[in-house]
Amino acid sequence: MLDGERRGWVATPAVSVEAFAGVALEGTTYAVTPAAVEVHAGIIAGEITGMRVVQRLERSSDRLISTPRLMGALRLWSSSETHSVRLVVAKIQYLDDQWRPMELEDSRIEETFRFATYGSEWLDPGQKAIHALNVAFPADALTARKLTRLRLEIGYVSSPYREEMFSFGVSIGNPQDER
C-alpha cells in the first residue's frame, strides 16, 4: 500500500499539440506531485516513479480521444532473503479528501492490472523487476481537484527459496584384480 499519510497529490497540466492523420490532437499531461513514491507490502518493496496523467483531445472539436491514464514505472523487488515471490495482480484506487474511492469512467472504483510479462512475475530474493504503469484515471480527479491519495494493493504468492544439500555415506573398497 502506498504511504497512506501522504497528502496533497497535485496535478498540473502541460499541453502539447500533434498531428495524426490530418487531425490535430491536443495532449495534456498532468504532472503528479509527488512524482515518485516508495511502496512496501509485506516482503515486497519498491517505488513508483515518473507519475503523470495523460489525456488526449481532438483540438478542433474538443472531442475526447483517450480517457485520462495514470502512467509511470513500478519498480518492485523481494526484500526477503529466504522467499521468492510470484507477483499475481495489482489494484489501484484513487481516494478523495474523505478517503472515499473515486469512480472511474465505467463506475468501477479500482483499476486492476496483471504482471503479464513472462518471467518478470517471479522475484527471487533481492531480484528487481520494472513494470510499466498505464492505468485508467478518474476524469473527476482532474476537474474536482479532490484527489489526495492513491492506494496500491499487490497480490503475490510467497514461496520459500531453499538450497538443499544431500549427504550420503560412501566407502572405497580394496582394489580388485582385473583379469
Image (spheres, rainbow, N blue to C red):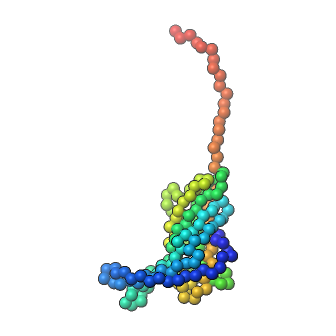
> Seen in the image, is 109 located left or right of residue 116?
right
> Seen in the image, is 141 located left or right of residue 160?
left
- The residue drawn where x is 52% and y is 9% is 179
Q: Residue 148: image x %, image y %?
A: 63, 81
Q: Is residue 52 depicted above or below 88 in this figure? A: below
Q: Residue 147: image x %, image y %?
A: 60, 82
> Which of the 4 image quadrants contains residue 21?
bottom left
> Seen in the image, is 64 located left or right of residue 138?
left
Farthest residue, direction left: 22
Q: Nearer the viewer, residue 43 or 176?
A: 43
Farthest residue, direction bottom: 61
Q: Residue 8: image x %, image y %?
A: 63, 81
Q: Is residue 40 depicted above or below 68 in this figure? A: above
> Which of the 4 image quadrants contains residue 129?
bottom right
- The residue drawn where x is 33% and y is 84% is 23
- The residue drawn where x is 57% and y is 69% is 48
Quarter placement of the N terminus: bottom right
Q: Nearer the viewer, residue 163 or 113?
A: 163
- The residue drawn where x is 66% and y is 51% is 82
Q: Residue 136: image x %, image y %?
A: 52, 77
Q: Is residue 156 depicted above or below 142 in this figure? A: above
Q: Is residue 62 visible?
A: yes
Q: Nearer the viewer, residue 42 or 29?
A: 29
> Which of the 4 image quadrants contains residue 58?
bottom left
Q: Is residue 148 visible?
A: no
Q: How many marks?
A: 0
